[in-house]
């Protein structure tokens, strides 16, 4: 028998917390009154158990629940079902953390490329990486391709579609991928520096598979995908069927979940195959607190079973002026994504983007060459 | 040009609400500063617009945003991306409502069977319907099949797997479906009354397709599925590929979203193909407020474009003693799901379940025979 531990943050009056914790354990396993269970094996081996209840502020508790790993299956749908299924229906319960035994970690392959794979593709073994986005949606394919070329000429590492770009008439998928991939290729031949175009993949599983085939035929190496929009199970299938792609996860719709950000973005995305994870940075348009961002980056990169590390990609209202501050905080195993801020002067996109690339390349990291992120000040 | 209207509930200081509304419109369309947009067509036809801001309590506002329908695609991933993508990353923004023009409704086929199709399968043209669940997970297949048979003998209309039952060693999918389907068939031959077994379908898209094939071969007509766990896009593909199934939606993990319950359960589930929707009833273990449950049932059943009505299935801590109260509130186009409460006396399951079926069958609805739900007191 083996158990995983799920930690929930529960708002509750003190006199009710024991009953509430027991109710969570029931919902996340057998979902029926214990007196309705006649079988000792089920009581002993299937019913989840409350392992600890700790105060965490006024009328707030951390509740550890042990969940039988034989219930959680081998796919993200059943996994989430068993760790945050019915309990999600209480709006004062948040999934805060998960401790997964090796037998669970082994069920998932995680990132196929991870930080090292991305660095190898870009021939950038040590420095921090750069990411830019093609905005606004609505532009026609030749304009998108021209913007792609400009970003690649400026030296950006990964150039991604805006996440709102699907397969609309103004920039159809196949035509767009062909043109943008060609534009980047042309710039790379001119500069001699690698750059990768990442088209946005969105749709039902059948649409995703069809688009993945098109992207593969065009030589695409990185794709943008929002796992919380396509669904984690569909994402897992795609990674499994098209392992040659680097998967750059977008956070669209992910905020609507009541799952702690470091867990969702730092670890669950990694468990299910994300190579690089975009998240909203502190001090930007969305403003997660700085310690949350730190814990998230830590979870993405720290040793975790046999899973490759995932590259943290802070984004969301990023400013050119903050490059040094952010690299100091996040360390070299980071990709900075600046979107709209590179575009605010349409005539000066090349200049602003070149400045971004140069500031990232020139940043003197305090850690010795080759040091891993855990040696960085961010990590305790 | 055509626009849909998304309504958001936003917590904000009064002096900031205009800027916040404008920020939502930007995030849900172009996601970049307006000054970065050089093209008048994009400004006129793609950028979302704030249509109204209305106070809704202290430091709380209803914000109507018009979103260009040409941006939202034809699949649930892109649809949710454009109505609640990045804006979900603000934890004080909730998606409260959607007004969809006919051009959007026409992109989705909705339920393939709906209330009328379920009634036809069960040969129950007017009365309210009954649903029971096989709990706890962990039981072996012969025990599950025996429970299935008991429920069918008692006259239950739809007998569903507990939503935690996946493909675990203790009740593998193929073996379970064969045994439970046979057990129900046997009971139906004995009683002469139709009953349907609904296996739980959970997994990645590839797993779902494989299990759907098995279920089809065994003659299954209803399947249980949690769209928020498998992902709405994967759900849509499945409904499209296997339209012969009645889809009974389970709410697992759905509570973790910041989408108003009547919208999510009553209408989005219907839009994307749910024939019957399970939701947590007022006064039960989870306790949505009664008006929320009323609005949810209303949204599932009210006329909406060409979409068939979806059957509301209140659940979650339902008690036998509440049958009459709930039928009075919900009306005849309803299926009551009683789970654990039928099982609390293991020796008396047949008797309790028979009592449940009889109370539902005997309930004297005040509305005239053949009246639709909108003629019922629940509807204004």
Image (cartoon, coloured by chain):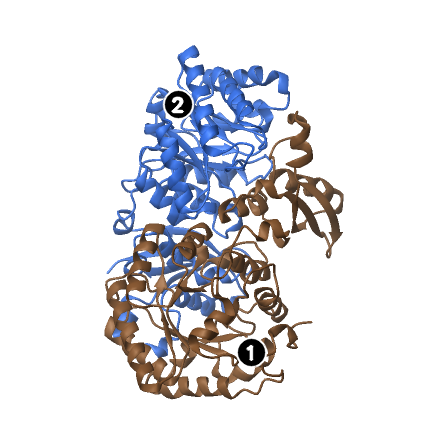
Chain colours: A brown, B blue
Q: Nearer the viewer, mark 2 or mark 1?
A: 1
Which quadrant would the C terminus of chain A be assigned to in this image? bottom right
Horizontal side of residue B239 vs A266, given as left or right: left
Residue at 51% over, 88% down: A362
Horizontal side of residue A233 vs A200, given as left or right: right
What chain is tagged by disc 2?
B
Question: Residue B56's spot in the image, x, y percent?
Answer: 50, 55
Assess disc 1: are there few (<14), some (14-19) or many (≥20) residues with their C-alpha within 10 Å of its C-alpha: many
Is label 2 in a helix, a strand or a loop? loop
- Displayed quadrant of residue A208: bottom left
What chain is tagged by disc 1?
A
Question: Residue B123's spot in the image, x, y percent?
Answer: 35, 19
Residue at 53% over, 28% down: B134
Answer whether residue B39 is visible to the viewer in this image: no
Task: Choose between B168 and B70: the one closer to the eye.
Answer: B168
Residue at 61% over, 68% down: A298
Q: Is residue B179 above or below residue A120?
A: above
Question: Residue A216's spot in the image, x, y percent?
Answer: 32, 63
Task: Choose between B331 and B334: the one closer to the eye.
Answer: B334
Q: CA distance from mark 2 to mark 1?
A: 70 Å
Q: Which residue is mark 2?
A: B367
Q: Is residue A252 above or below residue B118?
A: below
Question: Residue B247's spot in the image, x, y percent?
Answer: 39, 35
Q: Which mark is residue A332?
A: 1
Answer whether residue A196 is visible to the viewer in this image: yes
Question: Could you tell me if the residues under marks 2 and 1 are in contact, i.e. CB atoms within 8 Å?
Answer: no
Assess disc 2: are there few (<14), some (14-19) or many (≥20) residues with their C-alpha within 10 Å of its C-alpha: some
């Amino acid at each position: 028998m083996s158990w995983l531990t799920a930690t929930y943050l529960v708002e509750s009056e003190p006199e009710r917390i024991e009953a509430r914790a027991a109710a969570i354990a029931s919902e996340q396993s057998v979902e029926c009154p214990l007196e309705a269970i006649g079988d000792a094996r089920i009581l002993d081996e299937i019913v989840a158990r409350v392992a600890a209840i700790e105060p965490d502020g006024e009328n707030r508790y951390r509740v550890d629940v042990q969940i039988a790993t034989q219930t959680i299956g081998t796919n993200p749908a059943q996994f989430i079902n068993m760790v945050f299924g019915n309990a999600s229906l209480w709006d004062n319960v948040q999934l805060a953390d998960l401790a997964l035994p090796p037998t669970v970690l082994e069920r998932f392959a995680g990132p196929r490329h991870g930080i090292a794979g991305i660095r190898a593709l870009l021939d950038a073994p040590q420095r921090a990486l750069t990411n830019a986005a093609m905005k606004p949606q609505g532009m026609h394919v030749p304009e998108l391709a021209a913007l792609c070329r400009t970003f690649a000429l400026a030296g950006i590492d990964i150039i991604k579609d805006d996440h709102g770009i699907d397969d609309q008439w103004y920039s159809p998928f196949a035509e767009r991928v062909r043109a943008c991939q060609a534009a980047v290729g042309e710039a790379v031949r001119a500069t001699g520096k690698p750059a990768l175009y990442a088209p946005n993949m969105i749709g039902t599983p059948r649409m995703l598979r069809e688009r993945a085939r098109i992207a593969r035929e065009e030589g695409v190496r990185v794709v943008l995908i929002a796992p919380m929009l396509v669904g984690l199970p569909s994402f897992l299938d795609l990674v499994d069927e098209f392992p040659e792609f680097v998967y750059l996860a977008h956070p669209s719709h992910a905020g609507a979940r009541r799952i702690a950000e470091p867990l969702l973005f730092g670890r669950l995305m990694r468990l299910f195959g994300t190579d690089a994870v975009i998240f909203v940075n502190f001090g930007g348009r969305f403003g997660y607190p700085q310690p949350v961002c730190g814990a998230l980056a830590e979870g993405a990169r720290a040793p975790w079973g046999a899973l490759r590390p995932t590259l943290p990609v802070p984004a969301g209202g990023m400013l050119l002026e903050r490059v040094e501050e952010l690299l100091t905080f996040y360390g070299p195993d980071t990709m900075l994504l600046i979107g709209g801020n590179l575009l605010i002067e349409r005539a000066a996109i090349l200049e602003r983007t070149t400045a971004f690339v140069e500031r990232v390349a020139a940043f003197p990291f305090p850690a010795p060459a080759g040091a891993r992120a855990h040696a960085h000040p961010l990590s305790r």
